[in-house]
Image (cartoon, grey):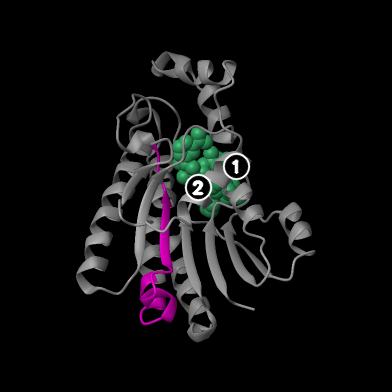
Amino acid sequence: MSSSITILTGASRGIGAAIAEQLLLPDSVLLCISRHASDALAAKAAGVPMRLEQWKRDLADPVSVAEQIELWLGAFDPARCDAVTLINNAGVLARVGPLDASTNAELSVVLRVGLEAAMLLTAAFLRATLGWRAREQGHCKVLNISSGLGRRPMAASAAYCAVKAGMDHFSRAVALDEAHRGSGAKIVALAPGVIDTDMQVHLRAADSSGFPEQHVFMDLQSQGQLATPHDAAARVLAYLRRDDFGSTPVADIRE
Ligand SMILES: NC(=O)c1ccc[n+]([C@@H]2O[C@H](COP(=O)([O-])OP(=O)(O)OC[C@H]3O[C@@H](n4cnc5c(N)ncnc54)[C@H](OP(=O)(O)O)[C@@H]3O)[C@@H](O)[C@H]2O)c1
């Protein structure tokens, strides 16, 4: 029952919910981690011969979640696992505006959920899967859902830009570590395009006085240029399944 194992954060809505739905595959194990569980996902999984677990956890407290993941992976028989994947998708926008418009607590949550949790979960995942057959065969993958805003700065989103730039650069460095020790794990930070989710609603609803580029997000929606979560998820998963996954540690789905 464990030919493929996937751990996915931020699966309760948005892109993550669509990715989770498309990972409800026979003979697979899917562990979803968000503060909320999805009843709709559970209902869909009920008709598929697979194992779905939904952990309600706050990734702003990532140390305990990373420890639990390491223990959870340790309970599997690596000989029965053909592929093992971690998708760090959960992310938060701070209050849109200049850095000092957010409280320290708000900024801390953005950094912890978007970057600290992604790094700690990646470390736990790599420790737990060391020596697994899937890893030696190149089927051990970490996919970090990044953003174009990790590569170009935008006013009113300093914390978010920093999180995504950090995600890109830690992915580059981990890729070098994995190449150096030849253990077979592959990692990519992938920008998924612009998608019609709560995050875009949050940007369009923000106070425009401190947000000079808000019109860009308004225009993308009014011109029908936002991808649906379903289509974005399909493209992300197609990227994950590419034979050359990992050859470029920082990538953009639109390239
Ligand atoms: N939408 C876009 O246009 C776009 C563009 C570029 C990159 N991205 C990236 O794509 C990823 C998904 O974005 P999205 O648009 O789907 O966002 P979203 O609709 O706001 O969903 C965010 C997900 O993250 C989870 N999450 C937030 N805070 C959490 C916490 N403290 N602990 C655990 N989980 C938490 C949420 O679950 P709970 O609320 O249940 O905890 C939810 O499942 C993010 O990394 C985002 O930066 C999005």
Q: Is residue 108 visible?
A: yes
Upstream in the sequence, badge 2 or badge 1?
A: 1
CB at disc 1 and ligand 1 closer than 8 Å: yes
Quadrant of the rendering where the N terminus is positioned:
bottom right
Residue 182 is left or right of residue 81, and the answer is left
* SS class, disc 2: helix
Is 176 located above or below residue 80 in the figure? above
Residue 36 place in picture, x, y as percent: 64, 53
- Magenta span contains residue 130: yes
Report the side of 222 relative to 147 (left or right).
right
Asked whether residue 93 appears in the rendered view, the answer is no
Residue 185 in which image quadrant:
bottom left
Q: Is there CB contact under 8 Å for labels 2 and 1?
A: no
Q: Residue 122, percent across and down? A: 38, 64
Disc number placed over residue 182 in the picture, else none: none
Q: Secondary structure at mark 1?
A: helix
**Residue at screen point 27% across, 61% down:** 174
Label 1 CA crowd tier, 10 Å (few <14, some 14–19, many 20+): many
In the depicted view, which residue is nearer to us: 214 or 222? 222
Residue position marked by numbered label 2 in the rendering: 236
Q: From the viewer's perspective, is residue 15 above or below residue 33?
A: above
The residue indicated by pointer 1 is 14
Q: Residue furthest front?
A: 243
What are the residue bounds of the magenta stretch? Answer: 126-147
User: Residue flagged by tag 1: what amino acid is it?
Assistant: Gly
- 237, 154: nearer the viewer: 237
Look at 30% across and 30% down and name the residue there: 152
